[in-house]
């Protein structure tokens, strides 16, 4: 439901979402049933998702019910999300870049089949476009690709969604936020760096009591995620390649270079782990939701 304050941009995000979702038909993308527009409110109507969003399962310690997912189910969800994003990039008559892949935007149906949702920040481009243009940064800090913030890194493309997917994968494995200023040790504040160093040293990753089969799943997800969050877009795989890695053998995967939080010549992005900031092309005002805040871009 979008209230009047969020419609400050003349409903452009609402129009974007209706126009984008209306052309999508995939098992891993939400299906738009209809929409409603009144003087004060605009609403999108989707199929009901009884299991809510993914964040309540991977950040179970932040929710009262404390529900968790098995590693097999976690892998199946990762695979489904990857298929959904790959469809957006290559399966439609236009290339759809989501720009806001994160746990809160992954909905789960009664069978825990994941559905990519929230297309308010999505942009459509011709399929052959390897580079896209934006008038303002879009996305959520903590999942936003670095090239959206630092032009020196590389051009903006579908690889921005790949980066966000990688950050999502790591949070699914770690069952914690990737940036946590309250971490027990300073080395654990930026989870991707910590997990890379432990992985590279051959140490066991602390993910609870799991079987040998589950260990293979977690290690595969970690390596794939680390490839997805490489600083330079050219070093990241496409979503089609991500699917091939997910479907392939773990032994065939190589460990990529260590991921960086920010470019070596750029200032550190200070942020609280419990507050992620969402950007869009137009100012949007919302009440804080799922640890997100809106920030106006002039």
Image (cartoon, helix red, strand yellow):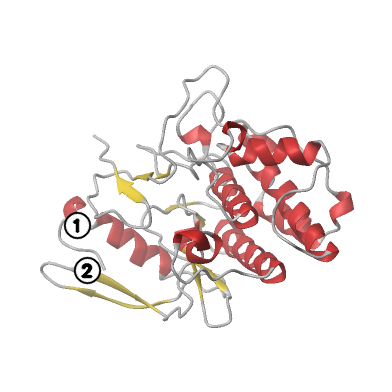
- Vertical side of 200 occupied by 211: above or below: below
Above or below 285: residue 69? below
Mark 1 crowd level (few <14, some 14–19, many ≥20, 10 Å Cα): some
Q: Is residue 264 above or below residue 148?
A: above
Residue 13 percent location from the top left of the image: 30, 56
- Furthest toward the right, the residue is 251
Please state the horizontal and vertical placement of residue 144, each as a whole percent of the image: 48, 42
Name the disc covering residue 42, or none. 2
Q: Is residue 222 left or right of residue 38?
A: right
Vertical placement of 266 versus 108: above or below?
A: above
Q: Secondary structure at mark 2?
A: strand
Residue 83 screen position, x and y as percent: 63, 64
Q: Which residue is mark 1?
A: 7
Q: Are marks 1 and 2 in contact (CB under 8 Å)?
A: yes
Q: How many marks?
A: 2
Residue at 61% across, 30% down: 260
Q: Residue at x 45, y 59 (%)?
A: 62
Which one is in front, 213 or 18? 213
Image quadrant assignment for residue 210: bottom right
Q: Residue furthest left?
A: 39
Crowd band around label 2 with a 10 angstrom C-alpha radius: few (<14), some (14–19), many (20+) = some
Q: Is residue 38 left or right of residue 18?
A: left
> Any mark on residue 124, and which?
none
At a point 55% along the width and 44% down the height, the residue shown is 178
Q: Left or right? Give the position of 142 relative to 130.
A: left
Q: Circle 1 — which element?
A: helix
């Amino acid at each position: 439901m979008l209230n009047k304050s969020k419609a400050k941009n003349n409903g452009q995000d609402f129009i974007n979402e209706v126009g984008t979702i209306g052309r999508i038909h995939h098992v891993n993308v939400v299906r738009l049933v209809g929409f409603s527009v009144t003087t004060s409110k605009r609403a999108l109507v989707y199929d009901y998702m009884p299991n809510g969003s993914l964040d309540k399962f991977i950040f179970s310690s932040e929710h009262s019910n404390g529900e968790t997912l098995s590693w097999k189910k976690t892998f199946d969800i990762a695979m489904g999300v990857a298929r959904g994003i790959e469809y957006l990039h290559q399966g439609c008559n236009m290339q759809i870049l989501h720009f806001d892949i994160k746990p809160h935007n992954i909905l789960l149906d009664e069978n825990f089949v994941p559905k990519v949702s929230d297309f308010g920040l999505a942009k459509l481009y011709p399929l052959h476009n390897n580079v896209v243009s934006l008038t303002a940064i879009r996305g959520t800090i903590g999942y936003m690709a670095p090239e959206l913030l630092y032009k020196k890194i590389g051009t903006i493309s579908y690889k921005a969604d790949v980066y966000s997917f990688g950050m999502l994968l790591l949070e699914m494995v770690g069952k914690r936020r990737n940036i946590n200023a309250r971490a027990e040790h300073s080395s654990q504040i930026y989870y991707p760096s910590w997990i890379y160093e432990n992985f590279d040293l051959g140490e066991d990753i602390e993910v609870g009591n799991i079987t040998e089969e589950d260990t293979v799943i977690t290690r595969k997800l970690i390596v794939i995620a680390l490839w997805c969050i490489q600083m330079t877009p050219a070093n990241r795989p496409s979503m089609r390649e991500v699917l091939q890695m997910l479907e392939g053998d773990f032994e065939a995967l190589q460990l990529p270079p260590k991921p960086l939080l920010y470019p070596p010549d750029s200032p550190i992005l200070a942020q609280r782990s419990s507050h992620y900031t969402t950007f869009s092309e137009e100012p949007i005002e919302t009440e804080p939701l799922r640890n997100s805040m809106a920030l106006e871009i002039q």
